[in-house]
Image: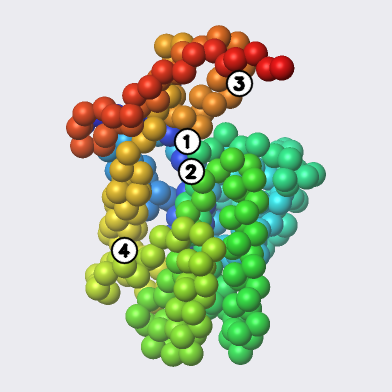
Amino acid sequence: MAAPYTSECPLRFAVVGDSWVTEVDVLPDGRRQPKSLSANALKDVLQQRMGHVDFTVAGFPGLTTWAMHDICTSCTLRHAATLSAGCYSVGRYPAASQCELEGLPVIQDPCSVIEDIDVAVILVGSNDLLNAGPYIDQWSQEILWNLKTVRATLRERGIEVLICSLYLSEEQKHDDPYREVVRKKMNRKLKRHGEVIDLDSLFGKYDPALWRDGYHLNDMGCDHFGKLLGHYLVRRFGQFPTAHVNGKVGTLAQMCICVAAVGHFTLDLRWASMDGGPMAGDFHVGPAPECG
């Protein structure tokens, strides 16, 4: 099988979300320790099928879309991962104040930031639905605005963004049927504004063996979810463009800056088939003509 990403040119991937991404264990001595079972399972699948992956994980139990928006306007995704590894309570406290405690820079202009991430999966929103209560109609519009703004902000930084659809367990659906109606309506609206990973289709039939309670996946459920998400992403990125500039190999996006910086170059654009099939779409570009 062709592996389009190497240690010299990895796929720079981030997953950001709530407790489905990272939970926090409290050790006997009182120390807090992050546990990212679903993210680890996802990483394993991506590395097995795609080659080298530079993997960034930022998970915060109880994270809402408001807190996700706060993260994007306060710090980079890699710095958010630092906060996650330190078990900071983003959401309970402003992300900027948590960055200052950790000694991380706080973003002054969210649109001026360039992140060294290629793809980000965002998994957040279910906590908003569960906490909305009688204000669910009003909150639903704010949740959608938050998610669309997060997507737009990260895209401005050069990241391809995939947002997971809002998901509720069977128990949560039965607890409040109207909440389920609103959830489905919100997911339809989300899909109109960009790519959405449909968690209902991804999970398929409800399996109670995967759940610790009506809100959280158990360890087996986290591992199962991470693998499902990983295989989805392998299918989603079934073929990867790789660019060869003056003998250096990288993804097309990563090598564009090289093309701009080199006066005379030869560019080979190749599609690396994930099933090991033949290469296609090979062509060469010489130096750009003089203007004027």
Residue 251 falls in image quadrant = top left
Residues at marks 2 and 4, CA–CA distance in whole angstroms: 19 Å
Residue 185 shown left or right of residue 149 in the figure: left
Residue at image mark 1 = 12
Report the Cα–Cα distance between label 4 and label 1: 23 Å
**Which residue in the protein does label 3 denote?**
260
Q: Circle 4 sits on which residue?
A: 202
Front one among 220 and 169 = 169
Label 2 sits on residue: 119
Q: Is residue 168 or residue 157 the one in the foreground?
A: 157
Q: Check whether the beta carbons of the residues at disc 1 and disc 2 lie within 8 A of each other.
A: yes
Which residue reaches farthest right? 108
Residue drawn at (73%, 47%) of the image: 110
The one nearer the camera, 219 or 18, is 18
Which numbered disc, 4 or 3, marks the residue closer to the eye?
Answer: 3
In the image, residue 240 sits, relative to residue 283, either above or below, namely below
Residue type, label 2: Val
Vertical side of 9 occupied by 227: above or below? below
Asked if residue 68 lies left or right of residue 41, the reply is: right
For label 1, the SS is strand
Contact flag, marks 4 and 3 (Cβ < 8 Å): no
- Write the residue at 54% across / 13% down: 287
Q: Where is residue 157 in the image (x, y as percent from the top left)?
A: 63, 42
